[in-house]
Image: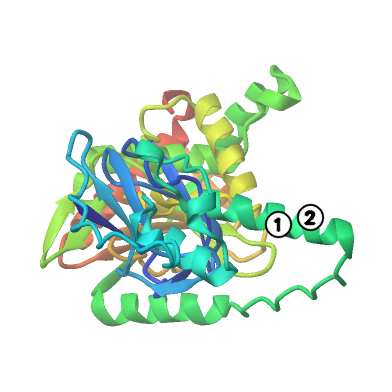
Amino acid sequence: MADFLMPSLGADMDEGTLVQWEVAPGDTVRRGQVVAVVETAKGAIDVEIFRDGVVEELLVEPGTTVPVGQPIARLRECGEAEPTPGPAPAPATATAEPDTARVRASPAARRQAEALGIDLEALAGSGPDGAITLEDVGRAGSARESMAEAVAPAPAKPAAPGRPVDIRGAIAAAMSRAKREIPHYYLGHWVDLSPANEWLADWNASHPVAERLLPAVLMLRAVALAAARFPDFNGFWRDGKFVAGDGVHVGTAISLRRGGLVAPALKNADRHSLPELMDAFRDLVGRARAGRLTGSELLGGTITVSSLGEQGVEEVYPVIYPPQVAIVGFGTPVERPWVVGGRIEPRWLVRATLAADHRVSDGRRGALFLEAVTGLLQEPETL
């Protein structure tokens, strides 16, 4: 038997509100399956299970806010025997009230039935061996309410006020921790984007609108390939040591419409073609702004890219997102005079910056990493 805990879906998360369960007691689940939706400062997030098994019990009702690390469900391994029931109660006399303890039902279902005044013996269970689940009780309660409304409709209940979420405060807390605990060092470098822009213009001119690429995707791909070459920038600082990532999963900073940022990961970004990466990027941005990311996307990044796009700021010095050990920033591309082959020409330049953890790498390694990013962007046909 194992407890499924309220997961930490980011360094800025201390608690979460369970919005809904996607499973019921008795359901068989597989590792990576979405089992719940949790509301955090970053929106509603689909939470996946960490192992295969059978849902034994749901410990938290939807709408409940619980701290990170608190058990919210109980899981048993596939094939593991169900817990042995306790000794049967003494037989009831002819005049005694029905003893609902003899009815197979989960503790959560019993509590809900008691709260709603529902007789468990009157219900048919849909769980294993006919056990009554929380959903069975909920359906019975809904049916009873529907019958009551048909006789005398009740006035509409006002919606419960939502709990205000301090997004800025949550982000500030995480970044304060990062600056306090991670010994940052910063490097900056101008990158000539003219070859990438020319290649991109040719690509987009020869493809339909739906298949066109954004400059940001070239930058993401260049960082991914450089991180594969320099694995000491691709991973985590955990328990006093560096742990390499199990792949190159590039987190991309996305601004939310209601304020704040999230940085979900593009998994195995070094293994996908530019069109594949563009499709994944478009999907990720859409779901991030709709508040429908998964926990593994929020937690899976091994290195992050923060790009200001067309915001008009030439340089960005980002803060490392713990427990990662590096983040790359790109400012707004600008047209400037640049020396090419001994001649001064107008070129499109972008300022690339690297923030890295000095416990894992140093300035020399950081310079080589940025040089690799630069070389890839100047040879876009290799991306």
Q: Residue at x 29, y 82 (%)?
A: 180
Q: Are marks 1 and 2 in contact (CB under 8 Å)?
A: yes
Q: Position of residue 116 (x, y in %)?
A: 59, 67
Q: Residue at x 39, y 45 (%)?
A: 131
- Which label sits on residue 147? 2
- Which label sits on residue 375? none
Of 174 and 313, the residue lying toward us? 174
Secondary structure of the residue carrying tag 2 is helix
Task: Indicate left or right for 45 with 244 as reference.
Answer: right
Cα distance, mark 1 to mark 2?
A: 5 Å
Q: By what rule are the colours in the image chosen?
A: rainbow
Q: Is residue 127 shown to the viewer in this render?
A: yes
Q: Is residue 346 shown to the viewer in this render?
A: no
* Callout 2 amino acid: Met
Estimate how packed mark 1 is, as few (under 14), some (14 to 19) or many (20 or more) residues with alpha carbons within 10 Å.
few
Of 269 and 331, the residue lying toward us? 269
Q: Position of residue 9 (x, y in %)?
A: 40, 61
- The C terminus, quarter of image: top left
Of 346 and 76, the residue lying toward us? 76
- Which label sits on residue 144? 1
Quadrant for residue 279, please give it: top right
* Callout 1 amino acid: Arg
Q: Residue at x 40, y 76 (%)?
A: 175
Estimate how packed mark 2 is, as few (under 14), some (14 to 19) or many (20 or more) residues with alpha carbons within 10 Å.
few
Q: Residue at x 41, y 60 (%)?
A: 100
Farthest-out residue, front = 94
